[in-house]
Amino acid sequence: MKVSYDWLKELVDFPATPEELLDKVSRTGIEVDSVSRMADGLKKVVVGRVVSLKMHPDSDHLHVAMVDTGEDEPRQIVCGAPNIEEGQTVIVALPGARIGDNVKIKRGKMRGVESDGMICALQELGFSNDIAPKAYDAGIYVFDEPLEPGSDALKALGMEDAVLDFEITPNRADALGMRGVAWEVGATYGNKPHFEDKPVVETGKPVADYLSVKVADEKDAPSYQMRVVDNITIKDSPLWLQRRLWNAGIRPINNIVDVTNLIMLGYGQPLHAFDYDKLGSKQILVRRATPGEPLTTLDGNDHELTPDDIVITNGEKPIALAGVMGGLNSEITAGTTTVAIEAAMFAGTPIRKTALRYNLRSEASSRFEKGIDVGSINKALDEAARLMAALGDGEVATGTISASHVDPEPVEVDISLDRINHILGTQLDAKTVTGLFDRLGFEVTEADGLFSVLVPTRRWDIHIEADLIEEVARLYGFDNLPSTLPTTTMTVGEFTASQARRKRSRKLLEGLGLTQIISYALTTPAKAAAFAIDDSEETHVAFPMTEDHQTLRRNLVSGLIDAVAYNVARKQTDLALYEQGRIFPRSAGHTRPQEVEYIAGALSGNVIQAGWHQAAKPVDFYYVKGIVDSLLADYRLAGPVEYQALVDDPCLHPGQSAKLVLDGEVIGLIGRLHPQFERAQKINETYVFELNLDALLAASRTEMTAVAAPKFPSVTRDIAVQVTANITNAEIQAVIAKNGGKFLQDAHLFDVYSGKKLAPGLKSLAYTLTYRRKDATLTDDEVTKANDRVEAALKSELGAVIR
């Protein structure tokens, strides 16, 4: 909320500069971010009056103007604006002046004619196109009132006014209007606001002769009021009104639209004005839209509405999106003569969703979302009608149409002095507390330390005693509250077993050279469905902020790949990343997803850089498998983790990927990304892994025990096995372990061969088998018998040939 210091001073008395006010209000609960003045850095800009005008002798578009700037003689200024005319009151930058972008104005010649200054447009003073009146987009700004030549133009334009940027939190929407801010500032300094409420004079026909209004469901519009102003003349607003709007960041349009914006800034009550003659009927109906119902809004965009949208209709077709934006078919234009004014209270949730759905979030919608003062709806409507009639030379129709109404009843909250002092740690007396409530404009009665407080409708955020305690604390001053240490029992915090294990997993991966990232839990449906360990349903966000963040993730790998692609695009190619976080699978028939803890990694590029003494070592499948094995080994799982070939995942390389299985349950995956997928993502060769941490934590584990070093030597045997290409190492290892006997300690694969010396479809694998007894030295006969059993089993179960 941009708050004009000059406007605020008209509403309430307070002894503070803008900078002092910023600090004081920030200390009492509403943060004021900054103070700015549009005139900062500008100088020597005055009001001028064009005395005479003639064409430049050497140009078909330049004019030579004689401009009265309050000096003895008029100044000769060459101006190229197409809208300059004799008799206009304009903005003049004198020689030596500083205008927008720190431009310095000098005397000079334009095509041989001397120019002693510059006639300015608002944009040249630093106004943005968003707030400068559209009528002057192509030329200089012309004052609509006869100001004194030579007077300060910056002051006349309101550019010397200090504008305070109030950071309004959702619970303090009462400060989204100048009157609410005045109450806040007045309470801070102990003064009450003084509002000049003038009565509306009704001189026209009865309003019922113009309109009938109906609300289909009062839950959508608990309060809906209308007035009519007839015989209006559309013209530019007076300068005082334009100043208030552009200092608040709003562009002046015309006297009718500007009044609706002024009332919104003053009262916090959004209004809308319809061109009565464009309604096409004498009926207004507030209802829900029908599916696909069309509406073109004031910004010129076409929308197909849904039943979630509240619309204002002429009884048949929509003429406005309630609380969000009006329709183009009822826009106020230069030909408007009769205006129908709407003041309402709309349900906040549908307004918020409609504004988000059509990307039409506006000053009005933000106020309806947070709430408005039901006690000022009709006050704002009356003031709007009065101002429109005054500024547009019109007449107000007699009466107000009320289709629905909310009684503005104050909220009564009871609280005791003991309770206030106990919570705040203070020793305030009843007189002090009563005075604080009175400064806020709350009616209060007190008896024996018990307060009955009537909270006016403008403070709809206050309902319970905790709210009143907060008001007392901030007005009394947080700095004045005593500082005390809390008295409580102390407990020693510690991690749960699950927290400790997750933390250790992160530490292990970082020790192995990986760097942690954190990615978004919301992603696209395609990315959410990829790299799935288990089948699950999608979970969509009802109102996603962007297309890329509409679905809850069901894997962590997609986020890691995005991070890899981001880094590769910036020439960072040696990457080792991991993420630990939750995924959100949803079972069929359930509305809420589960939350499952996962850990995943992605590696690309070199794991060892090239140096004078070594070659570069790129990451490969077995390097990543070593990382996964190290992580799994730390869990001391009771059962073995099997690596089973994964050939049906379109995102993974069919020959370099596997799923991890523990006790018959898939707990993870590992592999290289499919080359086509890598090209689509514009990344290099990349390997990924993903593990279900919750499954690992739930699995049976063995206890780590210390054993004595072996006293007896081990015996090794090498064996080379020729098998068909579809036989995996895991299958061979399983047969060896099953038949090697109780003295077999380890089976290590040390060579794999497939080439021209073998027939197509065959491969040879060589293993070293290690045997050891704990109680004696193994004999050669014992080892030979065990080895023979292994060879026989390999032949019979796998069809192997022992080489």
Image (spheres, grey):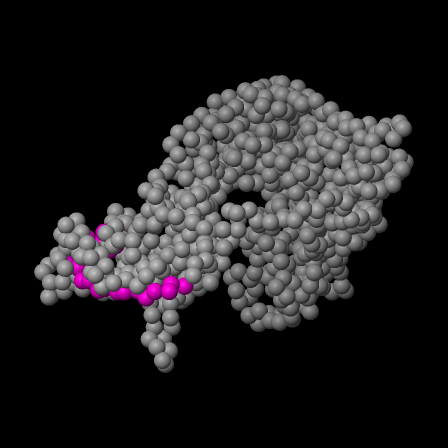
Whether residue 305 is situated above or below residue 473 in the rendered picture: above
Is 1 a magenta residue? no
Is 715 a magenta residue? yes
List x then y, in percent, for residue 330. Answer: 53, 32
Q: In the image, 635: left or right of 684? A: right
Residue at point 23% right, 60% down? 783
Q: Is residue 633 visible?
A: yes
Which of 678/762 is in front?
762
Which of 669/706 is in front?
706
Which of 11/14 is in front?
14
Q: Is residue 520 visible?
A: no
Quarter containing the N terminus? top right
Indicate the quadrant where residue 565 lies.
bottom left
List x then y, in percent, for residue 625. Answer: 34, 58
List x then y, in percent, for residue 358. Answer: 48, 38
Residue at point 73% right, 55% down? 160
Quarter containing the C terminus? bottom left
Whether residue 78 is situated above or below residue 691 in the rendered picture: below
Q: Residue lying farthest bottom? A: 612
Q: Residue lying farthest left? A: 759
Q: In the image, 79: left or right of 377? A: left
Residue at point 34% right, 39% down? 535
The total number of labels drawn is 0
Which of 514/260 is in front?
514
Q: Residue lying farthest front? A: 776
Indicate the quadrant where residue 760 lies.
bottom left
Q: Which residues are magenta?
A: 709-735
List x then y, in percent, for residue 381. Answer: 68, 30
Residue at point 59% right, 61% down? 79
Indicate the quadrant where residue 173 lies.
top right
